[in-house]
Amino acid sequence: MAGSQPPAGPPPAAAGVTAPSGRHLPPLPVLVAVMVAVALATATLGWLAWRSGGRQADSVRLVPVPTVRTYPPGKEPAPEFRLTTLDGGTVDLAAYRGRPLLINFWASWCRPCVKEFPLLRAVRERHRADGLEVIGVLASSDSPAKARAFARRNGGTWPVGIDRGGGPAGETTIAYGVAGLPETFFVRRDGSLAVLQLGELTEQGLRQHLGSILGP
């Protein structure tokens, strides 16, 4: 009919997107805004985790890691390190060859590290005749003064080396592939890794893992 107008449809700019299934999706500007918001939230969480660094009691991990890892005898040597200790001396891993070792990565701000401290003290005393030694590696993000005061207050007389390097992870921490604190490596007399324990040590776990390093 002359003068009639075609049916009005939605303006092109306001139209959404139709998915292959027929489901109507939000307009493109809305999708972009949502994607930007998600990206900003993810970046903010990542920055907060990095910014808090050593001040968090529990580590932030992006991928699951095993709690316990075992190593075949003599296959993987413990990475060497030589660090300044809390009392101003030097701890050199090479000097302990021939002795079974517990290398404990820790920090004074880490609650699980603090909880397992008495166990380390007790196991060292119990197996002194076997030559067992505990070597601590203090996180580079920690305060040596606070760690020194804590160790003295809680009877920690084993050597504690201060890891070198800026940021949340020091050189020794990186060399050992430490994923979080606390983390303890059981080292055989020949200097090879035997067991890795990620997380707080328990009496049962200690008894189980010590068998792999106290033998000849």
Image: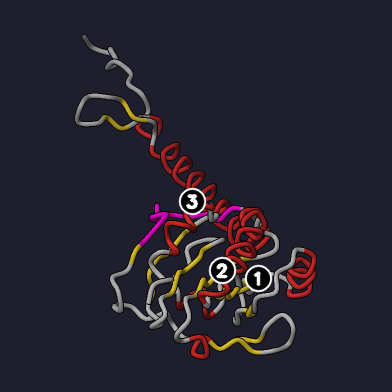
Measuring 54% from the left and 47% from the top, which residue is drawn there? 41
Q: Is 182 a magenta residue?
A: no
Amino acid residing under circle 1? Ser
Q: Quadrant of residue 51?
A: bottom right
Total numbered labels = 3
Q: Earlier in the sequence, mark 1 or mark 3?
A: 1
* Magenta-colored span: 58-69
Amino acid residing under circle 2? Phe
Label 1 SS: loop
Q: CA distance from mark 2 to mark 3?
A: 20 Å
Label 3 SS: helix
Q: Residue 105, labelled with which disc? A: 2
Q: CA distance from mark 1 to mark 3?
A: 30 Å
Residue 155, compared with residue 33, is above or below; it is: below
In depth, the one of 174 and 123 nearer the eye is 123
Residue 19, compared with residue 201, is above or below; it is: above
- Residue designated by label 1: 141
Camera-nearest label, 2 or 3: 3
Measuring 62% from the left and 71% from the top, which residue is drawn there? 139
Measuring 65% from the left and 75% from the top, which residue is drawn there? 158
Q: Earlier in the sequence, mark 2 or mark 1?
A: 2
- Residue designated by label 3: 204
Quadrant where the image shows the N terminus: top left
Amino acid residing under circle 3? Gln
In depth, the one of 184 and 61 nearer the eye is 184
Question: Residue 124: x and y, percent?
Answer: 59, 68
Quadrant where the image shows the C terminus: bottom left
